[in-house]
Image: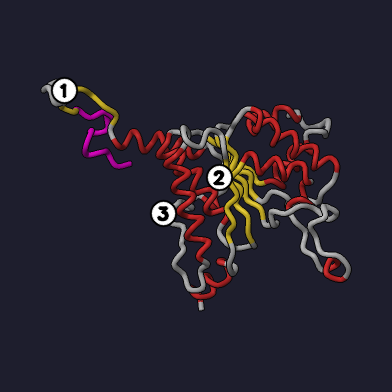
């Protein structure tokens, strides 16, 4: 491991104030190590460890203007946190492959590195599996022990909300998570591949043959009551366009 040339490995550097006095402050290397430890605790999967706001690409061919708008909103959100955001989160919606997870992780990364926040990343489906697994008598962790960090995280990224098959149990679990964080005014950043609309039967959908071809909405997947709650908890950011993973990766390897 290379020794820092600024502090010679001590982690402190001497700074001279305007009045001529000299004080010791944390060296950049110590600050970087501290940030790295905090980010390591966020549970960001290895696949997304490289995802930052700076690496979010909006200039590839056929990129939708909405991606640039989403990127600007993400940067503004970080700059406004926490005094101006006051517990309000973000709901990133859009089709598959528009970079919602990248942007969400980038926001979490920036909040930790730039604003000193702490946070956690959870895949929605994996979280539900962990909760279900806690009902197994051979598993020592209880449901409360699994959900406590989710409830208490300063910033929570919940990826791919609605991806699990809807059921009464799923709806109750989602309601428990979202309501707890809403009541505690904790920041929640959510991604979903489902459109931010009400469920079938809400009076807003097409009827007849068009209804049979209708795509499922977020209201279908988590229930209209919780979708409505999200409108209070989060600012909705819609991201549209082609599948980034297919178009860009094909261009790179073609």
Query: Dot 3, how many residues are within 10 Å of its Cα: few (below 14), some (14-19), or many (20+)?
Result: few
Using the image as rendered, state which of residue 150 and residue 133 is in the foreground: 150
Task: List x then y, in percent, for residue 149.
Answer: 63, 30
Which numbered disc, 1 or 3, marks the residue closer to the eye?
3
Between 52 and 225, which is closer to the camera in this rendering? 225
CA neighbours of label 1 inside 10 A, class few (<14), some (14 to 19), many (20+)? few
Q: Is residue 5 magenta?
A: yes
Q: Are discs 1 and 2 less than 8 Å apart at CB?
A: no
Disc 3 target residue: 54
Q: Nearer the viewer, mark 1 or mark 2?
A: 1
Comparing 103 with 200, the one in front is 200
Mark number, residue 44: 2
Question: In the orientation shown, which residue stands out farthest toward the bottom?
Answer: 254
Coordinates of residue 151 in the picture (x, y in percent): 65, 31
Task: Residue at 63%, 43% (x, y): give it.
Answer: 122
Q: Position of residue 104 (x, y in %)?
A: 54, 49
**Distance between mark 2 and mark 3 Cα atoms:** 17 Å
Q: Is residue 40 above or below residue 141?
A: below
The mark nearer the N terminus, 1 or 2, is 1
- Stretch in magenta: 1-14
- Residue, far front: 203
Whole-Å distance between the Cαs marked 1 and 2? Answer: 40 Å
SS at badge 1: strand
Mark positioned earlier in the residue sequence (2 or 3): 2
Which quarter of the figure has residue 8?
top left
Residue contact between numbered discs 2 and 3, judged by CB atoms under 8 Å: no
User: In this figure, what is the number of numbered marks?
Assistant: 3
Tag on residue 22? 1
Please give the name of the residue rendered at 62% of the width and 46% of the height, measured from the top-left corner: 190
Secondary structure of the residue carrying tag 3 is loop
Residue 51 is covered by the magenta coloring: no
């Amino acid at each position: 491991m290379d020794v820092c040339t600024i502090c010679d490995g001590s982690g402190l550097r001497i700074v001279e104030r305007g009045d001529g006095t000299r004080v010791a402050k944390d060296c950049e290397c110590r600050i970087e190590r501290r940030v790295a430890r905090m980010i390591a605790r966020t549970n960001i999967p290895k696949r997304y460890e490289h995802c930052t706001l700076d690496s979010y690409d909006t200039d590839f061919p056929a990129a939708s203007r909405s991606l640039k708008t989403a990127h600007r909103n993400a940067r503004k959100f970080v700059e406004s946190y926490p005094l101006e955001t006051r517990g309000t989160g973000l709901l990133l919606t859009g089709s598959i492959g528009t970079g919602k997870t990248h942007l969400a992780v980038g926001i979490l990364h920036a909040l930790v590195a730039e604003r000193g926040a702490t946070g956690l990343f959870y895949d929605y489906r994996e979280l539900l599996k962990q909760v279900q697994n806690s009902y197994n008598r051979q598993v020592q962790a209880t449901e409360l022990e699994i959900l406590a960090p989710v409830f208490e995280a300063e910033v929570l990224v919940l990826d791919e909300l609605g991806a699990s098959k809807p059921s009464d149990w799923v709806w109750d679990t989602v309601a428990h998570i979202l309501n707890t964080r809403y009541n505690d005014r904790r920041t929640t950043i959510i991604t979903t591949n489902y459109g931010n609309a009400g469920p079938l039967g809400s009076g807003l959908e097409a009827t007849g043959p068009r209804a049979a071809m209708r795509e499922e909405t977020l209201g279908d997947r988590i229930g209209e009551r919780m979708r409505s709650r999200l409108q209070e908890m989060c600012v909705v950011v819609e991201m549209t366009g082609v599948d980034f993973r297919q178009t860009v990766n094909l261009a790179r390897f073609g």
